[in-house]
Amino acid sequence: MSSNPNKSEQVRAMFARIAHRYDLMNRLMTGGLDLRWRQQAIQACALPPDAWVLDVGAGTGDLAAEALRQRPGALVVGCDFTLPMMLRGRMKPGRDRIRWVGGDALRLPFPDEQFDAVVSGFVMRNVADLDQAFREQSRVVRPSGRVACLEAIRPPRRWWTPLYRFYFHRTVPWMGAIVAGDRAAYTYLPQSVEGFFTLEELARAMIRAGLILQEARTFLLGTVALIVSMKPDRR
Ligand SMILES: C[S@@+](CC[C@H](N)C(=O)[O-])C[C@H]1O[C@@H](n2cnc3c(N)ncnc32)[C@H](O)[C@@H]1O
C-alpha cells in the first residue's frame, strides 16, 4: 500500500466530525463485543506490572484505558493525530491518567525501543502507508516487546457473507446517519474494510516490518482480527 497524504487528511477530518458519537457507535455496532476484544488484545501483550505501553491511533483511549485497568501501575501513552478524539476521551472518568500525545502513526514522536508493548485498535486500515506504520511500531518497541493489532479485516467468503454485507453496507450507514449524524463516515467504514486485507495479508505486513508472529485469532465470524507479534531479541 503506498503513501497517500490526502488519505491522512480525509481520515483526520472524518474522525474529528464523528468524535462526539464514536464510542456510542462502537458499542451499538458490535453489541458491546469490542470491549471484550480490547481486553483480549491487552492480555495478549503479557504486560509487566510497570509496563510502558503505547496505544497508536488511540482515539478516545479505549485500549489505553483497558491497559490501565489491567495494569494500574503502567505508564500508558495514547497517541493520535485527531485532537477532537483525544479531547473526547480525556473527558471520560479515569482517562486523565493516560498520557495523551498528538502525533502521526507514520512518524511516531518517540525514541527507539521506548515501550514494552505497542497496541492499535481499528487504526491500521486508516493509515496511508501500512508498512511504514508497522515499521514505526517495530522501532519504538523494545526487543522482546509485543506489538498487538486489533483490526476489522476482509472476512473469508461464507454462506453468511450476504447477511454480513447487508448489515455492514446498509444497516451501519443508517445507524451512522441517525446516531452520529454522519452517513458518509459510516459508509466509509464498510468500504475501508472491503478494500483492506485478510488476516494473512495483515500478518505478512507485520513480518515485513521485522516482527515475529506470536498469535493470530479472529472474532465475530472472522470479521475482526487480533494479531500479536514480537520484536526479535538482539542476542
Ligand atoms: C477507528 S478509530 C480507533 C480509535 C481507537 N484506537 C479505538 O480502538 O477505538 C481510528 C483512529 O486512528 C487515528 N488515526 C488514523 N490514522 C492515523 C495516523 N496516521 N496517525 C495517528 N492517528 C491516526 C484516527 O484519528 C482515529 O482516532
Image (cartoon, helix red, strand yellow):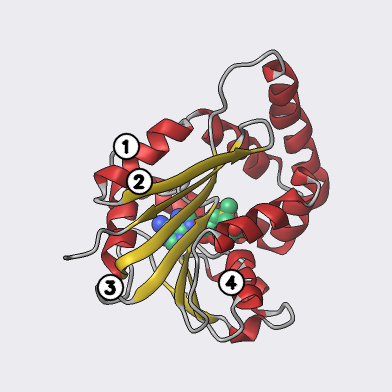
Foreground of the two, 66 or 182: 66
Camera-side residue of 222 and 56: 222
First along the sequence among labels 2 and 3: 3
Dot placed on the residue nearer the N-terminal end, 4 or 3: 4
Which residue is disc 2 drawn over?
130
Indicate the quadrant where residue 97 lies: bottom right
Question: Contact, CB < 8 Å: mark 4 with mark 1?
Answer: no
- Amino acid at the residue labelled 3: Glu
**Mark 3 or mark 1, which is nearer the start of the sequence?**
1
Tag 4 and tag 2, C-beta contact below 8 Å: no
| Dot placed on the residue nearer the N-terminal end, 4 or 1 | 1
3D distance between C-alphas at marks 4 and 1? 30 Å
Q: Find the distance from the CA under tag 1 to the CA under tag 3.
A: 25 Å
User: Which residue carries the number 3 mark?
Assistant: 113
- What's the residue at 71%, 46% (across, down)? 182
Q: Residues within 10 Å of mark 3 (few under 14, many from 20)?
A: some
Residues packed near mark 1 inside 10 Å, few (<14), some (14 to 19) or many (20 plus)? few
Q: Which residue is mark 1?
A: 1
Residues at circles 1 and 3 in contact by the CB criterion of under 8 Å: no
Q: Amino acid at mark 1?
A: Met
